[in-house]
Amino acid sequence: MYELKRIWITRVPADKKAWEDLLFLGGLVPDEQVDYTVGLYDRNKLVATGSTYQNIIKLVAVDPEYQSENLLTKIVMALSSKLHDEGIIHFFLYTKPCVAISFASLGFKEIIRTNTILFMEQGSPDFSDYLALLESRKRDADHAGAIVMNANPFTKGHLYLVETAAAQVDVLYLFVLSDDRSEFSTEERSKLVKAGTQHLPNVVILPTRDYQVSSATFPSYFLKDQAVESIARVQATLDATLFKERIAPALQIKTRFVGEEPLSPVTEVYNESMREIFSDTLALTVVPRIELDGQVISATRVRKALKEDDFQTIKKLVPATTYLYLIENYGKINRGEKSGN
């Protein structure tokens, strides 16, 4: 009889060590980016484990000596039940490709796989629904390009990247991150991108949902300061593979445009991974960043100026559409004259 218990990997060093040892035994790299971890114990021995991070099931491992005991099913059912209790009915799974059949039998559908990672999902709306959305917005074009951006908020740097890309293709699909984990909300960021690019008729703005640079496909993106490079590289490879094999073909995208990245190591890892994964299938065009006063224009500079209520600097860094929005909605917040937002 096995006992299911929660594992507090940040509180009990001995439990963390047993958890790490089991993951290594299963060929997995321990990743502390988790919200909840459980383990199955044979007496005092940890023989199976699994974790959740937001709407993701990950780090599922079973001791090789217990592979015939169906413990994987018990772990996944326990974690699925936990997510359902939290009201999460659409969730994702990271695991090893060799156990694809086991998870398919539990109702998971494969989205994409690399040599080391299998990415699956359960619930709806799912990836087929996302592909249907893309198909509904597709335009006929000899040369289609794409940009994926957070735009937190939309700056003159973003605008330069979009205008440069749009001039080189017939249609440019501009994906704005759907993950609501930035200082500016998804709704705000999408609104500012739309306003700032309305003069470009060949730009089509699309959401990324959970399938591009999201907390599901690339969680390290949102923890740039703490991200371990090796983990970020694995996640970036998965994200780039999904774009190359499933998303680009749906829209017949031939070129992905990215900004040169001198500031963020994680974003640079992502650009490197795309270059490697795309190879001869997709072109990757790196556009140099534009500068102001000897520094690249970045959303980070805008957010810093916003905290300091420095709208003179902001006006130099953002398009007029972004500037008007910020001054109308955030201009008095830092002086305590307006609340909310």
Image (tube, helix red, strand yellow):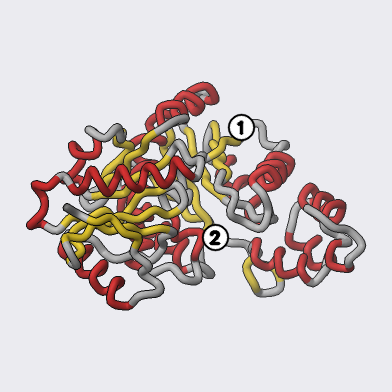
Question: Mark number for residue 233?
Answer: none
Residue appearing at x 66%, y 58% in the figure:
183
Question: Toward the viewer: 94 or 114?
Answer: 94
Element under disc 2: loop
Residue appearing at x 33%, y 53% in the figure:
58
Query: Could you say where residue 182 lies in the image, as x and y percent from the top left?
Result: 61, 56
Q: How far separated are the C-alphas under marks 2 and 1?
A: 22 Å
- For this view, does 249 lie left or right of residue 27? right
Q: Earlier in the sequence, mark 2 or mark 1?
A: 1
Query: Could you say where residue 82 lies in the image, as x and y percent from the top left?
Result: 41, 47
**Is the residue under label 1 in contact with that under label 2 (CB below 8 Å)?**
no
Residue appearing at x 44%, y 59% in the figure:
35
Mark 2: few/some/many CA within 10 Å (<14, 14-19, 20+): some
Amino acid type at image mark 1: Asn
Amino acid type at image mark 2: Pro
The quadrant in which residue 23 appears is bottom left
Look at mark 1 in the image and give the residue it sits on. 202
Question: Toward the viewer: 53 or 171?
Answer: 53
Query: Could you say where residue 273 lies in the image, as x and y percent from the top left?
Result: 35, 56
Query: Could you say where residue 81 lies in the image, as x and y percent from the top left?
Result: 38, 42
Look at mark 2 in the image and give the residue it sits on. 288
Question: Toward the viewer: 161 or 19?
Answer: 19
Q: Residue lying furthest right in this view? A: 337
Residue appearing at x 44%, y 60% in the figure:
220
